[in-house]
Amino acid sequence: MHWADYTAERLSKERGTKQVACSGITPSGEFHIGHLREILSAEMIHRACLDADLDSRYIFIVDSMDPLRRVYPFLSDEYEQFIGCPLAFIPAPDSEGKPDYDGVSYAEHFLGPFLDALAEIGVYPEVVMNHETYQNGQFAKKIDAAIEKADEIKQIIESISGRELDDNWFPYKPLGSDGSMDEVTVTGYEKPFVHWIDRYGNSGTADIRKAEGKLPWRIDWAARWGIHGITCEPAGKDHGAAGGSFDTGLPICKLLGSEPPSKMVYEWIQVKGAGPMSSSSGNTIGPIEALNLVPPEIIRYLIAGSKMNRHIDFNTGGALFQMADEYERLVADPPNIESEELTKRQKVAAITQTGAMRLSQIDRGSNPAESVAGVSFRHLAMLAQIKASDEDVWGSLRNSGHLMGEPNSALKKRLTRMRNWISSVHFPEDARIQIRSKIDDETRAELNDNQLNFLSELGEQFSEINWSDEEISTTIRTTAAKSGISGRESYTALYLAMLGRKHGPKASALILEIGRKDAVDLLS
RNA sequence: GGGCCUGUAGCUUAGUCAGGUAGAGCGCCGGGCUUUUAACCCGGUGGCCGGGGGUUCGAAUCCCUCCAGGCCCGCCA
């Protein structure tokens, strides 16, 4: 059974029919590919719950109340003044990285494009801005409980995580006079007000029913589980480690009066491109960029096809072809779950694969066969390289019977992504079509006399015929017959001459694209 | 030091929760296709399931132990 379906079944037994899957993100601007695993894991469990007829929601909590932790490389020095301030309350950077006081908040600025990217992979969560949950008082009860039980919480954190907390540690961080929560000391609590004094010596009070402060991370996480009734939130393995935030979160959540979700941990995902690894070359790739290169169902398949506790190497180089092939083959020839001939194991594998395919669809419930848009990933990679204009690509697809009429938007997006990939550093060199200008000596040595005669004869024919796909194709065959070699030998010779390999894309299309002059020069 | 995860064919892996003769894809080799869109079709190759021990009629699967790799224990998924 697929892990998402298995989880749905388990959740149903543990928590009944009402399910709330959740994932979160800090909109600091530093997104990485791992967020996709977190989000898709939660979203797929949500879909599996729906498919199991459970009443499921998927919420996406944006940590907009989290403080700016440091001045990131893409920010100007002016952001120094905002360190410690909630991301929802500080201005977004403009194109030069300077704060733009007239625009949207920092949190919204980075969140927008990210949500757009999620829509591309068919993820439409209920978005919860965490600062709003503070603002509208939903946190108040939990904050009060946390303050009342501060000693117990402190003990939980200290005993489970092994960290030692300061004597003046307090389970609530109020905002100081400058809006930052750094170095603000709590001086007292009179429900619902927390009294504080900040680093400038200014004092004030924070109303726990408003967004005038927040719970520290480990408590915030535990509290929100209760507030939103979250039954499932996959967490990265860092949280899952002994003493990590999951282990402290479970008892804290109970202490605050709610039932926590059961522990669920996923492994890391790492990016490998065609070039050297990120640290040395800066050849790294974020989730938004990845979605600009890779077909969305392939991204989903990457996550859906791997078990949660399995480390994923996301390779944006040649392995993409393999992954796309695998997906397309699966879709074209889905395993027959009903077959009587399968052993138990084969049956389990078939069901798992079918589940992965189902969960890889952008639109829930749509037919997987429609996702490939009638053209293979490999084929499109070839066409995108030899056809400069999109119109010519569609023309070629119509000729080959892959396309009827106008391309749909899925296919157009596929081509756009393919072009992005090809022009990026990630595209594998050995997939690049390199057309030679001359037949080199090495190639000549590999060919027999008949093949060489065939090539030079072909060059002469090419300078005379009509320059069309069909004509070129016919000429190759007739010339081959005249030279007394088989179709196979003739094509092998032609590909070796043009590409230095024995195989290639359809020869006539390729030659048409090369152009008469270069083709004749090459063969003569 | 404490803990988590992983180790199955050259590569990527399924199967481990519910023990019942090791499955797949890629690669490779051979054959087919007298129009080769890196194609497609057919056949073949390949595994003491990390090592050792235990439980069992029976273990990749459960238990113990060792080895190897990755990771966490600082608010990095």
Image: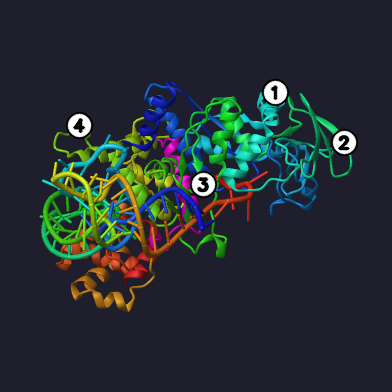
Instruction: Report the side of A406 relative to A446 (left or right).
Output: right
The region drawn magenta spans: A406-434
What whole-number distance in Å separates the C-alpha atoms at marks 2 and 3?
39 Å
- From mark 4 to mark 3, how far is it between C-alphas? 43 Å
The numbered mark, 2 or 3, whose residue comes first in the sequence reads 2
**Circle 1: element type:** loop
Residue at mark 4 shares a chain with residue at mark 1: yes
* Left or right: B61 as drawn, with respect to A218: left
Query: Could you tell me which residue is drawn at 73 percent across and 49 percent down?
Result: A97
Residues at discs 4 and 1 in contact (Cβ within 8 Å): no
Q: Which residue is mark 2?
A: A203
- Mark 4 and mark 3 on one chain: yes
Q: Please say if A389 is above or below A434.
A: above
Label 3 sits on what residue type? Ala
Residue labelled with disc 4: A338
Structural distance between the alpha carbons of marks 2 and 4: 71 Å
Label 3 residue SS: loop
Q: Position of residue B68 (x, y in %)?
A: 39, 64
Check disc 2: other Cα within 10 Å, few if <14, some if 14-19, many if 20+.
Answer: some
Q: Read off the chain for label 1.
A: A
Front tag of 2 and 4: 2
Instruction: State the residue in front, A436 or A358.
Output: A358
Question: Circle 1 sits on which residue?
Answer: A137
**Pointer 3 chain:** A
Foreground residue, B32 or A178? A178
Task: Tell me how far mark 3 sits from mark 1, CA to CA.
Answer: 33 Å
Residue A242: give its label: 3
Disc 4 versus disc 1: nearer the observer: 1
